[in-house]
Structure formats: C-alpha cells, structure tokens
Image (cartoon, coloured by chain):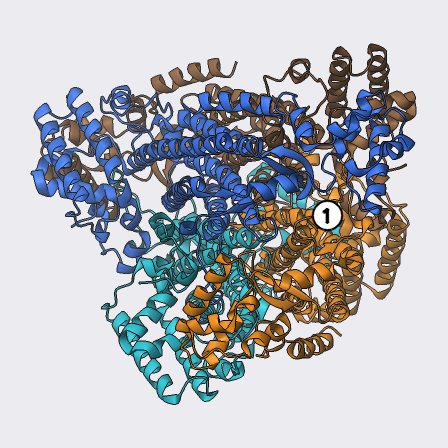
Chain colours: A blue, B brown, C cyan, D orange
Amino acid sequence: MKKPWQGRFTEKTSRIVESFTESISFDRRLWKYDIEGSIAHAQMLARQGIITHNEAKKITGGLRQIAQEIESGKFSFREDLEDIHMNIEAALIQKIGDVGRKLHTARSRNDQVALDLRLYLRAESGEITSLIQKLQGIFLDLAGQYFGLYLPGYTHLQRAQPVLLSHHLLAYVEMLQRDRERFSDSLKRINRLPLGSCALAGTTLPIDRTYVAQLLGFVETAQNSIDAVADRDFAIEFLSNCSLLMMHLSRFAEELVLWSTEEFKFIELPDAFTTGSSIMPQKKNPDAAELIRGRTGRIYGNLLNLLTMMKGLPLAYNRDMQEDKLPVFDTADTIKACLSVLIAMLPGVVFQTERMQETAGAAYSTATDLAEYLVKKGVPFRQAHELTGRIVLSAIRQNKKLEEISLEEFRKYSPVIQDDIYRRLSVADSVGNKKSLGGTSPSEVKKQIKRLKKLIQ
Amino acid sequence: MKKPWQGRFTEKTSRIVESFTESISFDRRLWKYDIEGSIAHAQMLARQGIITHNEAKKITGGLRQIAQEIESGKFSFREDLEDIHMNIEAALIQKIGDVGRKLHTARSRNDQVALDLRLYLRAESGEITSLIQKLQGIFLDLAGQYFGLYLPGYTHLQRAQPVLLSHHLLAYVEMLQRDRERFSDSLKRINRLPLGSCALAGTTLPIDRTYVAQLLGFVETAQNSIDAVADRDFAIEFLSNCSLLMMHLSRFAEELVLWSTEEFKFIELPDAFTTGSSIMPQKKNPDAAELIRGRTGRIYGNLLNLLTMMKGLPLAYNRDMQEDKLPVFDTADTIKACLSVLIAMLPGVVFQTERMQETAGAAYSTATDLAEYLVKKGVPFRQAHELTGRIVLSAIRQNKKLEEISLEEFRKYSPVIQDDIYRRLSVADSVGNKKSLGGTSPSEVKKQIKRLKKLIQ
Amino acid sequence: MKKPWQGRFTEKTSRIVESFTESISFDRRLWKYDIEGSIAHAQMLARQGIITHNEAKKITGGLRQIAQEIESGKFSFREDLEDIHMNIEAALIQKIGDVGRKLHTARSRNDQVALDLRLYLRAESGEITSLIQKLQGIFLDLAGQYFGLYLPGYTHLQRAQPVLLSHHLLAYVEMLQRDRERFSDSLKRINRLPLGSCALAGTTLPIDRTYVAQLLGFVETAQNSIDAVADRDFAIEFLSNCSLLMMHLSRFAEELVLWSTEEFKFIELPDAFTTGSSIMPQKKNPDAAELIRGRTGRIYGNLLNLLTMMKGLPLAYNRDMQEDKLPVFDTADTIKACLSVLIAMLPGVVFQTERMQETAGAAYSTATDLAEYLVKKGVPFRQAHELTGRIVLSAIRQNKKLEEISLEEFRKYSPVIQDDIYRRLSVADSVGNKKSLGGTSPSEVKKQIKRLKKLIQ
Amino acid sequence: MKKPWQGRFTEKTSRIVESFTESISFDRRLWKYDIEGSIAHAQMLARQGIITHNEAKKITGGLRQIAQEIESGKFSFREDLEDIHMNIEAALIQKIGDVGRKLHTARSRNDQVALDLRLYLRAESGEITSLIQKLQGIFLDLAGQYFGLYLPGYTHLQRAQPVLLSHHLLAYVEMLQRDRERFSDSLKRINRLPLGSCALAGTTLPIDRTYVAQLLGFVETAQNSIDAVADRDFAIEFLSNCSLLMMHLSRFAEELVLWSTEEFKFIELPDAFTTGSSIMPQKKNPDAAELIRGRTGRIYGNLLNLLTMMKGLPLAYNRDMQEDKLPVFDTADTIKACLSVLIAMLPGVVFQTERMQETAGAAYSTATDLAEYLVKKGVPFRQAHELTGRIVLSAIRQNKKLEEISLEEFRKYSPVIQDDIYRRLSVADSVGNKKSLGGTSPSEVKKQIKRLKKLIQ
C-alpha cells in the first residue's frame, strides 16, 4: 500500500522509521471515534454537494462494516499504514473502491486526530465521572451505616479531636465532588469541534462545520483553524484533573494502609482485596491500596509528559503531538481501574468500632473543648489555651486522664471551672457540641449527608 | 515571646528548628489577607456575642494600624514568631492588650492560612486574568494593524500553506481565552470560605460562617471542616492553569525567537527588549522571549512540587502543607512578569512585511489549492492528492514554481485542469478562498476579530 | 492454582483485584533474568547442602526447559498467577513435581524481583551504551567527512561566530561521552546482589550469597537485607541518566528540525526518514526528529513517576514498588529506538555545503575577531568591544559588510587598525585562528577527533 | 552605566525588561567564585603576555578589595548592571581604571557563568557530602547505642519479622552511602574547566586553559568550546543526586512521623524539634519530619524545572539557561537544612524500648521461622509455607500466640515438629539465627557497623 503522501517521494520509507513513527499500535483504540467522525463528515460532504448522497451512503455503509469487523476482532491492523485513520481509509477503499478516496476531502489527519481524541476524552470523562459518583455513593453509604461511630481526628498524624467517622468519610465526598466539577468544567473545552480546520488553514471547499458539530453532539465549533490543530489543552486539562483526583485517592489509600496496620487497627480489609506474603503467612497486605497510592506517580508523570512535550512548540501541528495519546490512554485506564477497585472494596471494609471508640477519647483529645469551655466562661482565648496547656501537662505528669482531675485541682488553674466541666470533656459532648456549619456534630453531619446525597443524583 | 502552644512544653524550641520551620520569611506577603480575614472574623464574633462590640472595635482598630505599619515598612517581622498569623496577633496584643487575646477564638491557624491563601489567589487570579485580557487586546491590535499581511503557515516547521498573519495571531487570542476560562472556572472553587473549620472539627462556639463569607465576598462556605483544612486543590488548580498558560506563552516565545533569526527574519524586536552580547556586538538577542520560554520549566516544577507534596497525605492538616506557598507565590510573580513583558514588547515588534509576503508564496505552498481545485473538478481527493504530489515533484526537479508550469504540462497529469488554475495558485486566492468557518480568508478572519474583541471586553 | 500465600485466607481473591494487582502482563519481559537468577540460586542451595545436587539438577533442567518454551512462544502466561516469578515456579512444579517446591527456599519475591530488575538494567545499560558508542562513531564520521565546512555558530539562535561544522558535531560526541560515563558510574550500583535478603531480614538457612553473586557476575553483594529489598535507587539512576541522554537527543533533534526548514536549509533529510503530508504533497516533514524531541517528555515523565512513587515510603518493601517496572521498560525501549533511528538516519543526511559556507560569513559574524584584533594591538578589551560595536552599527546603517569598510573609515575608529585587518575578517582566518584548547580551528578540531576516536573504541 | 554590549544599540533598555532579565538578585551568591575565577584568569593572561604582570597585579588587588567589600556587606549591587559578572567588573574599573577593562579579554559571560556555577557546585557538593557523612555517623551511633533492641520489621506496613533496630537504621546508612557515591561520581564531571571557551568558539588569543584549570583545582579542561558553554549536565546531575537523597530522607521522615504517633509510639521526639498546636495543647507535632517530607516535592520540582528548560535547546548558549541558578541554589540550601535538622534532632530521639520489644514479637512475626524450621527438617519450602499458613490461621481463630500452641497440635500439622520449636519461635532466636550475609542477626549487624564506620571516615 502506498503512503497517502508518497507521490512526492523517491525512496521507500525505511523500515526502522516506519516502526518508530507508527501509531497504529496504540491509536487503534480510537477506531470507534474515527469512524463516528468520518460518518458525520461524509454526511456533511453530501449535504453540501461536495460528494453525492449516493457516495455518502456507500462510504457510511463501508465504515459501518469496518466498525463491525473491528468490534468482532476480524479486522487486521497494519503497521505500514501508520495510524488508525489510514488503516480505516485503506480498508474503506478496498471495500467500496474509488468512492472511498473521496472521504478525506476537506479534512486532514491533523484535524481528524484532534477530533478523535476529543470524542474519546468526552466518553472517558463521562465514564470517570460516573465512577466517581458511584464512589461518592459508597462513601455516603458507609457514612450512613457507621453513623455515630467516633474516630480520632488527626492533624500531623497526631490525634487531635474526636470526630465522627461519617464526617471524615464525607471529606472524601467533597473532594470527589470538586473532581466532578473539574471534569465538567473541562468538558466545555473538550466539546469543541476541530474538524474542518484541515491541515491548518481551513479549506476552499464549501463545508459546513456547524452541521458536523451538531451531528457529533459538540456544543461549539473551534473558531480558529490554526489553533484547532495546534491545541492539546483539552488533553492536558484531562490529565491535570486526573492528577488531582489521583492525589485524593492516594490520600485515602494512605489512610487505608495506616488503618489496617496492627498499630492503628481501625479496619479490616476484605480478604479478597488483600494478598498474603510468599514467606510470611500471617500477613494480610493492603495491596490494592498500596497500588492506588503507587500509581499516583504514573498519573503525575503522564501530566508532566504532555506539558513537557508541548513546551515551546511553534504553531501549528508538529509530529511531537502524536505523543499525546499514550499518556492519555494510560491515565484513563489507570483512573478507572483505581476507582473500580475502591468501589468494589469499600463495602467490604470492616470498621473496628470498639477500637475506634476507645482511641477517639484517648490522648487528651478533648483538650480543645476545655479551652472553649473557658472561653465561654469569659477567659480570653489565648489565656484559655495556655491554661489548658498547663492542665494537660500536669495530667500527663500524673498519668491521669482529663476527666480524672478533681474539680479542686481544676479550680487551681481557673476559678471559672465548675462541675459541668466533666460532661464537656466526654467524647459525646465534644463531638455533639461542634454544631458550627461544617462541624462534626451529628446534627450537622446529618445535614451534610442529605445535601451530598442530592448532589450525587 | 512565648509560642502560642508553649504551655505544654518544657524545653525551648531549638534555634535550628525555628529557622527550619518558620514561614514568616515568605508568608508575610499574605499580611493584607490575614488582616482582612481577621477583621471579618472579629466582626462576626461580636455579632454573635462571643466578644463584645467594643472588643471587636478595638481589635479592628488595632489590625488597621498594623496594616498601615506594614504598608509603610515600619513593621518588624520576627522569625521566632514563626508565621504571619502569629506576628500579627502578637503585635495586636502588644498594641491593644488582653483584648487581642480574644481574636483567635473559634479559629485555628489551619483554617486561617487556608483563608489567607484563598484570598491571595483570588486577587492574583484577578490580576492575571486582566493581564491576559490586555495581552489579548494587543494581539488583536496587531491583527488589525497587519491585516492582509501573509505569513507562511507551518506544520512540522515546514511551510505548509499561506495564511494571514492576523489569523496566526488570533490563534493565541483563542489559547488565552481558554486560559481565562480556566481561571474563571477555578475561581468557583477558590471562592469557598474555610474559616470556622478551626483545627479540623469545627467549634462548640456559636459562630456564623455564612456571615464571614458574606463579609469577605465568598460565594460559598466550605461544608466539611475536615476537608476545608486538608484541601489544597485550589492551589494546585491555580498552578495547573498557570502551567497551561505558560505553555502557550512558551510557544509564542519560541516563534519570536525563530522569527527574529537571520534565517526567518520575519520580525525585528524592539531594541529595548533585547540585549547584546558582551563579545559579539552585532548581535541582538531575543532575551525576553528566551526567558519566557525558559521559565516554563519553573512553573511546571512548581506544579509538580505541590502535587508531590500532597500525595498520600492522611487527613487533615499536615505540616508538609506549609510548602504550598512558595511555589504559588513564585508562579504568580513569574506569570505576571512574563505577561507584562509581552504586553510591553509586542507593540514594538516590527514585522518584516516584504520578507513575509515573499516567503508565504514560496515552496509550493499552494499545492493544497491545486489538490482542492482538482477535487472541485471531480477528482476523488486521494487521487487529486497523488496527482498534485507528482506535479510538485516534477516542478522541484525542473526548479520551477507551480505557476511556471505550462497548461500543457498540467494537462498531462489531468485533463480537467484549465486556464483558471493560475489564479488559484496565487497566494491571494489561496488565502482568500479558505472561507470555511475558522479558515484563513480575510472575510472569516475579520469576523473572528470582531467576535474576539467582544469577548475580551 | 492456589496462590502461594493462600493458606491463611478464607475468601477467594476478587477477580477485579486480581487484574488490578497482576504484573505478569508486563513483568513477563523479565523471564530470562528470573530463570538465570533461579538457576544460580538452586546451584547455591545445593552447594550449601540445603537441597541435594540431584534436586538442583532437576530444578535447573526444568528451568532451562521453561526458558526454551518461553523463547519459542509456547509458554502460556496466566494472570491468576500474578507475576513472572509465580508463573515460572508453577510451571516448574508442574514439570518436575514436588522438587520444584524447594526452589523458593531462602528467598522471597521481594529480593527476587529486585534481582531480576538489576539483571535487566545491567543488560539494557550495556545495550544503550553500545548504541551511544555507535552514534558517537557516526558523529565522528560526519565530522571527518565534512571537515573544513563552516557553519554559523549560534547563541540565542542568533548567528554569533563561524565555526567548523565538525566542531559543532563533536559537541554532541562530548555530551554522549558524559552519558556513557554516567551509565558506567551507575553500573557499579546496579551490580550489587540483593538475593538472599529474603523478605527483609535475611534467613536462618546457611546460604552463601557471595557465591550467587559470583555466578551471576555481580561485583558486590548488598550488605543490608532491609535496604536491599527497599532500594530502587538503581532504577531511578537509570531513568535519570536516560533523561539527560534524551535531553541531549532533543537538542540535536531540534537542530535537525531547524536545519531542515526552508529558512535554514542547512540539510536535507533522507526521504526514507521523513514523511509527507496527507494534504500538502510538497512537504517533507522531519518526523523522526520531531518524535525524538517529543518523546523527551515521556522519559522525564517516567523519571518523575518513580521519584513520586518512592517518596515517603516506609521501609522495607511496599506494593507501590511494583510500579517501578513499566516506566523502566518504556524508557529503555524508547531510548534504544531513538538512538537506533539516529544511527540509521544520520549517514543519509545531506549537508548543504554552499548554503552553510555562505551564511557562516554573513551577519557580521567575524566582529569578535575585529575586537580581538584591537586587543592584540593594545586596546583594552572593553574599549575594543565598544569600538567594534560602533563599527558594526555604522556598517549596518550603510548596509555594508565589515570587509567592505575602507581602511580610512576603520582608522577613524582606531588608528591601530591596519591593512592586515581584511584578512582577519575572513571566515577562514576567523575560524583558523581560534587555536585555543577546545577552540574551533581545524588544527584543534583535528586533535579532538583523534582523541574522541580513541575514547569510543 | 553603559551595558557592555551597548555600542550597537540605539534605544535604552526598557526598565521592565531590565528587571525581567536581571539575575543579580540571585547570582550575587556566586561572587566568591566569580572573583576566584577572575583572579586565575588574570594570572594566566599575564603569564601568556596578553596583559602585563603589573596589570594583573592591579586587577588581582582590585578584585580582592571587592571581595572584602562584599564580604563585609559594603558593596552595593546594581540591578541595571544585570548580573554578578558585570557588577564586579564595573566596580573593578571604577576602582583601578582602564586596566580593569582588560580583564574580560579572551572570555565571555557564557564561559564565565559556567565556571562560577561549577565552582559553586563543587563547594556545595563538598558541604553536602560532609553533612551526609555526619548523618551517617549519627545513625551509626544510634545503632550502637540501641544495639540489641528489637523492632518489628515491616513490609506493606504490616509487621513481618522482628529485626534489630540497629539493622533498620543501618539501611539508611547504606542509602546515604550510595548518595555519597553519586555526588562523588558527579564531581568528576563538575571538575572540568569551561573558561576560555569564550562565547562558543574559543579565541584567537594565546591563552593557556590548562594553567587556569590548575590554578582553580580542576581535574580536566573541557575539550569542546561549543559544548562547554551549552552544557548544564553537571547542574542536572546535582539535582538528580539531591532528588534521590531527598527521597531517602522523606522515607525516614515518614517513619519518624509514624513512629511518633500514639498508635506506633516507638519514639518520642525531642521537644525542641516539635511544635504544639495553637488550639490543641496536648499535641506534639513532628513538624521537622513533616517539613522534610514535604520539601521533597520542592527538590523534585527543581529537577524537573531544569530538565524542562534544557529540552530542545539548540546549541550553544541560550538565555533560557540563566534559569539554572535558582533551582540549584534552592536545592542546595534545602538539602543542607534538612540534613542539619536531622543531625541536630536524631541524638535527642528517645526510642521506647519496652513498646518496641513487645510489638516486635507480636502478630505472629516469627511465622517465617516456623516455615524455615520445617524446611530444615526436610519439608519442601512451598509445603512448609502452606503448613505454616494453616497453623497461623488456626492460632488466630483460637486467639493464641504461636508459642501457646501445644506440641500435640503442632504435630497434627507435621510430625517433624519437635520440642525445640518453642525456642525457635522466640524473637531472640528469630533474630539471632538470621546469620546470612546482610541479615538481621546481632553478629551480622555488628560486622556491618564496623564496615560502615570505616567507610564514613
């Protein structure tokens, strides 16, 4: 088969350069979108009288046949045909003859590949968004299921204040909600039709790009042909959104790893989602969580890859840009796999309620409540804070819990302290009274569950 | 001065750790936002009866004085007070006495620093957006000024088809427009009030976060206190938007470098924006453009810095997160400087119109038009393309331009070619006939200028 | 087939986690090294009396059979067996029965995979080094072939001073030489045997690690079992070395792209290594060079991937580390492909000697020689430099070349200028007189060619 | 003050470009190296008769005076003089008059800045290496001090097998040793003199670069003038070495954070190296460790910055390369601060020996020893492993420790088990018997301490 551009050339393409420059080994994944775009393009060509309706019909029919062949695994991709576009076009010509040679009228591989990638990313963004939504649902289910269970809230990985486990889990629902917002924001920019920009300058043929946009469900038509073929913002945005999402997942994965240690012992992971050691049979390794955490580097690397690749490229298309596909594909696959594993695993996680309740109240975790108690009694915050610090220090030295300090001793520090202090130092009151908007009290958390449930529908 | 948390500690903080952990050397830049936030916080505390109105007045007055002192350079920041929050609070207490100790009621440095950074990024996003807008305006001015001037359009840095210089410049207006869209999208997520989340769990005191949000012009209130102090998405989004913007600038910078070479010679940069060599006096170096290109790495590095830092951090706040500020500050400064330099430099760039006109038509740049001519005469695209290729090859061998080929010779390749071909091979026709939406024809480019002018107002 | 660690587990491994955690789809590439390591291990076990010599023989025989099966494509890898280690062990047991169950004595997958990756990287480093050497040879050949040809030397992409093309090409030989040094330095750290560290603590069995090291050609034995299984420095070093190498290649690729533009026109790339456009038949795109440049981002991304992955991992092995393989494999493959393409392409590059000669002397490129002429006549450098600047400016204004300035006019600037100035302003003298060590004079460049030829043998 | 290259220019440099392009605000740090290099250069110029010995004396004297002024803070740096080179040269001319104008003979800022940065990196590499050595010493001291103390060895953050704390600490000594090796390897490539390459082509003046190399203590002289000014490998290598070092520190920092949690409770950090919370007085936050971990992103970002900046730059010098300094300076400072904090903090860390001893033996951590016991009695490894798994599972179900299983029960699983099993299941025996090279037995660890002590002297 001749290359589409071979007219001008006298030597044969070197075999080594063929396999160096080919993209069919990976861009074959775009076949569905390539065909979808070509069908819309052919319909427009016919509508505009650039080809006949009969020709469009033959082309469309041929393309649909090819789609079936690919789907059923019968299509054989050829490296010497370089990319998915040429593979499909060549097959089309073989199937329907000369008419097939008209399909590439008023377009170029430059705008075609930009189209395919946008269609792909639109679909993937949709799938990812719906997986995020599912994961949010599972967090919300857990928040409902374990409602009322306490967890030590951490800062600096030191126990700080008791919180509701549900409250902690909702923090992830919020993060994921922002992730969805970002994918949705970026969709606006994915949804712009590049086709019809041709190589870079547009065409002298009377095409109708708005009609193609309509057929393909694009919201807008890219308005500058040079930019349209030179632009990969939409791919980088996608990778950037995925990096943030992956960062969130890595934080939760880290918590799963920590929580399933012997030391924390807050959860037991379902057997089916852990593996053992080939030499230490007693171990139950949180592999899935570790791999999610570990794959964060992969997504970051993919983002950096594209950013580096695009740096300093003069307009319009440069062959460097062919390198956009692998990192994008790898990222979409990895993200979907990570989300799916969490969706499958989380419902089976068993929270060790007894251990969590017990630790939530330990380590002077209600000291802040003592400070706020003093504030309410009129002590300026900084003094209240310092007093509390001294009380805690004395308690540590006596190896006492806060609630084991006698009222007499309390009052040595401040006479405003009264009998009601003891209730205030309980975990139940500490959590229950944090009724500020977004705070950890059951009443507030309940509100948030309700709000978020609505958001994810 | 005592540390705010010193009650519990028995040893003095090591000097080495003090200078290792301090942030005042860089977070002092946030002073304006810290004070703005504190004033709003104090007003809310008074409104809710947590402090008296008189106390709030004193606090507010003290803070305003401090603001003046900082503005006029009279304030002396102290490293042993660690950060901007403690520097200001300590000064306040010194100024207004014990009342100052009440300001930190119902907040924590965790939610305070998140607030300050959001206020900072809101302001910076605004400034950057308005600089982008100015730069768009300058591109549009140039597009107007040089309307009608041809430029060789490039793909693979090979001359492909003639385009209007204006069309090429508008491609950057489009990129910058997407940049503005992104900053605007991210603003939604910056504009969420974290204050009142306290350390991580909220507070038992009867605060009104919605009121604070109102006072500070926030659109929403962060709804989960754990997430609110653990979240740095907004900073990463900012860096990611800046990375894309910087990538765009690097592409234009590359073109400025190329265009001002002896070889391209499309532009002459204004003397004031180039430098000479200390040993080669004849040179005129495009330093500003090179530095813009070079600083791209810096912004990418800052993005990676934050992504790496946040990876795998358990909730909620961890001290690692203090590292968010330097990359964010450096990015905002660098971006604003790069935009400002372009804004100042571009109006002085002199396009070498003669050279550009001449090259736009060279190198068989209208070959595509020949192909489309054939298509219009009924030749299937792929055949038209191959024929054109053969004609070009023969022309190269004879060292002829396309328009120097005789009609007779043309017709050897295809009998459909007629006398009208010669007009079609002119640059004027090649450009003028690309009337597809987004194409390079003057009529279409004029429309785009109009549309974009509206968009940037 | 049971998992090796299944004794303790009650539930079956989830299918989704199986495919999420498997590595056989990519680590199968390590089969050769895995078997090589196992054979050495078995021989040691026998020598130490831990298994019998007969058992070792059976194991060795079985492994060699498996190697043949894999090599000939008859082996079927199973995802449910997770990784290459278990795939081979399971096949061994099936082949030779219970004796196969003894092979894993005194080792763990943790030290086994570290071994395999080290053996792989040793081999790849060797292959890459030898490709670099070949590429150096080709640069040296070109430097010999085109000896005497001038090129404008650039700084800031502005023509600065004429240099020998050979001198310019040798700059790449120097860079590549440093690359080889780095791969060689890193080899010291690759060449340390981890096997026998077992899971992390060593073993109670009387193994002889030094003997295994000997059998496998390792120079040293890793001396701390915890470190040995937790260490991936050697993989990151490899990626870092590849990043620097790729950066060098990207610079040359950029020059190939520039040099093959219509504007520079210094070279013509061989047809077989360029492609045409599907719509602009006259173009000859430097795709191979562009792709090399574009793939730089991929290698950088891989480096960042591993660095990010390893950040903050507690000792010893964590499952995250499984993610080390893909970026390492992809990097080695990409680097080898880029080197191979350059090796194949460069000999076919045609330098446009006329164009290069002509431009080398243009644009006042010998101004520095004028300045140095003045210095030799006693003018302080800074004055000489300033005078030269003024002379050039006046020449530009008169649209004259330097050598077209009359002696009289020259002497208005400085009376020390004499008739001999005209020879000094020729490109031949400018280049010929730069005899400082490392300078561009033919005599010096000849010396360097000789030195470098020796180095690459 | 005139710019050195101002002769040719007609407009004044724009103020905005001046502040955009200046580097004096950061490269002033190189003053010492700039002067050192200039003194050596002047001495060579005199020796070669390019300037007189008297002139060299004046120059040298002037430079030494300037050095004193800078050291004592009396020197005022000027932004309009762009960089450190011009600031010093201008001051020299002001001080010693016209003679000062001769200093820049036969060099350029391109080779001068490459020289300065190499001298700087040589010094910093030395300081960092010596700090690493100190930190190794402290790890070794701790390993000696706590010799005999057990720690649970972890894989997947699950307790795996008991190890000696000393063994664990030595793992870091090994990592740091590799770091030192890398800095030392890179030093070879830093130690190459670029000076005398001038702008890019060498000089016609009879300089002696080898002599300058000698004076400045360089081991080699860069042999290609184009490469010498275009090369930043040495800076990237430095950043890459620092990234690996920082990754190691981040792993230890993570362990410090984990170990100082309430949950692990293996260590107590010295008060002086932690801070409290502004609202939770009971907390003791491992800030220093968190910041070390957090600053890893900064170093990675700096590495990526330089790699990105250098990507695709054509030879030789481009202004982009000015951007090399900030990431290098920031990295050296950060690394030295992190090392210094660890050096100061570690001796004060208190290991909670009781807690560590107790946990080291818990959680079936000697299961592997049971498996190896079976192997020694002739059970094939995989069977031994599976049997052990079943025994552990049964023990877990009965809530028994391994040593609480009766011999009778043991023998149900395998008749080879005898009374001696109980001793083998003790932590002391488990650790004590791992005598393989690099293993955790006290005898082996003692050997390693001895070996490493020698290495760090």
Quadrant in the picture for residue D32: bottom right
**Image: C388 above or below C111:** above
- Per the image, label 1 sits on a secondary structure element best described as loop
Quadrant in the picture for residue B69: top right
Q: Looking at the picture, how far across and down is residue D393, in whole percent?
A: 46, 60
Where is the N terminus of chain C found, in terms of image quarters?
bottom left
* Residue B117 horizontal side relative to residue A69, left or right: right
Q: Between residues A44 and C118, which one lies in front from this camera angle?
A: C118
Please give the residue where the numbered disc 1 appears in the rendered image.
D286
Look at 37% across and 33% down and name the residue there: B360
Q: Looking at the picture, how far across and down is residue B270, in whole percent?
A: 60, 32
Within-10-Å neighbours for mark 1: few <14, some 14–19, many 20+: many
**Image: B361 above or below A224:** below
Q: Looking at the picture, how far across and down is residue C426, in whole percent?
A: 55, 56
**Amino acid under disc 1:** Pro
* Residue A356 horizontal side relative to residue D112, left or right: left
Q: Which chain carries label 1?
A: D
